[in-house]
Amino acid sequence: MLPIYVMYDSGLDELERDAISDAIQKIKVMVTGLEIRNYGSAAWSTGAYSSADWYIQHTEIVHGNYGGTQLNADSLIDLVAGEPWRGNDPHIDIVVTSYDITALDDGKQLNFVFGLADFGKGVSIQSVFRFRGYSDLERFLAIETLIWHELGHILGMAADPRRPHTEEKLGRHCTNYGCVMRQGMSVPEWIEHARDAWQAGQIYCPECISDAFVPAH
Ligand SMILES: [Zn+2]
Ligand SMILES: [Zn+2]
């Protein structure tokens, strides 16, 4: 298992930053041996490829279907995958941005995406933009869920189509109530799933937990 590095741009507010560190702390307690480091928005070096802000500044900007400005998530993934640090220090990057992001699906530009991951390249991009305007509790839960959901994908949760209670919805996802590995196709749906998991008092359902921690046979 490669170490996971989390970084975010300087546009995140305090609640958004707190939600990310809280999510990381909770997962560290749950999953022993998981190496996950939160670099935040600080620069870890100088010059090119040295902070989340640098990546954002060098990402292609697109003018969204509804007239807003968005980042091209594919371009951001390629930029991060091309960083020079990876040769000596192989790892997975999770980049959280305050900007709205979009991506192509079958050559068509989507209105927006919460996130986009390419685990072959070892990069996951997530945006908190669409949760702004919701209550503090809802935003906090939605962002924690975003981080846990991506970590779940990295750990291989709900990935096996032979497993019951999974479905294909922009990738393989869990269908169990109260599990953060469910797929949300809209902001209200994402927030509802985050609330369900919180009310159920769990992060991952038992099936997703055994996907990640029971060796395949
Ligand atoms: Zn997913
Ligand atoms: Zn699950």
Image (spheres, rainbow, N blue to C red):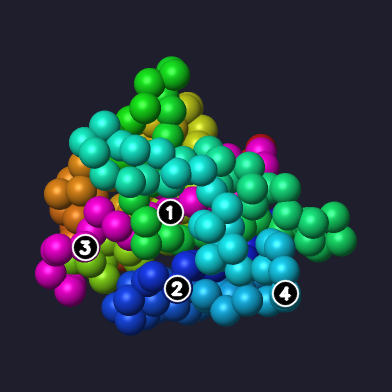
> Seen from this angle, which residue lies furthest top?
106
Q: Is mark 4 within 8 Å of ligand 1?
A: no
In the image shown, does 158 or 123 lie closer to the viewer?
123
Estimate the spatial distance between the alpha carbons at disc 3 and disc 2, rounded to whole Å.
16 Å
Estimate the spatial distance between the alpha carbons at disc 1 and disc 3, rounded to whole Å.
14 Å
Mark 3 or mark 4, earlier in chain: 4
Estimate the spatial distance between the alpha carbons at disc 4 and disc 1, rounded to whole Å.
24 Å
The span shown in magenta is 115-137
Mark 4 or mark 1, earlier in chain: 4
Estimate the spatial distance between the alpha carbons at disc 3 and disc 4, rounded to whole Å.
31 Å
Crowd around label 1: few <14 · some 14–19 · many ≥20 (10 Å): many
> Seen from this angle, which residue lies furthest right?
88
Check residue 126 in the rendering and tell me which mark sits there, or answer none: 1
Residue 129 included in the magenta stretch of the image: yes
Mark 1 or mark 3, earlier in chain: 1
Q: Residue at x 33, y 30 (%)?
A: 110
Estimate the spatial distance between the alpha carbons at disc 1 and disc 2, rounded to whole Å.
14 Å
Check residue 46 in the rendering and tell me which mark sits there, or answer none: 4
Check residue 211 in the rendering and tell me which mark sits there, or answer none: none
Mark 3 or mark 2, earlier in chain: 2
Q: Residue at x 14, y 63 (%)?
A: 133
Can you say whether 77 is above or below 15 in the image?
above
Secondary structure, mark 2, is: loop
Q: Amino acid at mark 4?
A: Thr
Please give the residue where the numbered disc 3 appears in the rendered image. Answer: 132
Q: Amino acid at mark 2?
A: Ser
Mark 1 or mark 2, earlier in chain: 2
Crowd around label 2: few <14 · some 14–19 · many ≥20 (10 Å): some
Between tags 3 and 2, which lies in front? Answer: 2
Can you say whether 162 is above or below 20 in the image?
above
Please give the residue where the numbered disc 2 appears in the rendered image. Answer: 10
Residue 122 in sight from this viewpoint: no
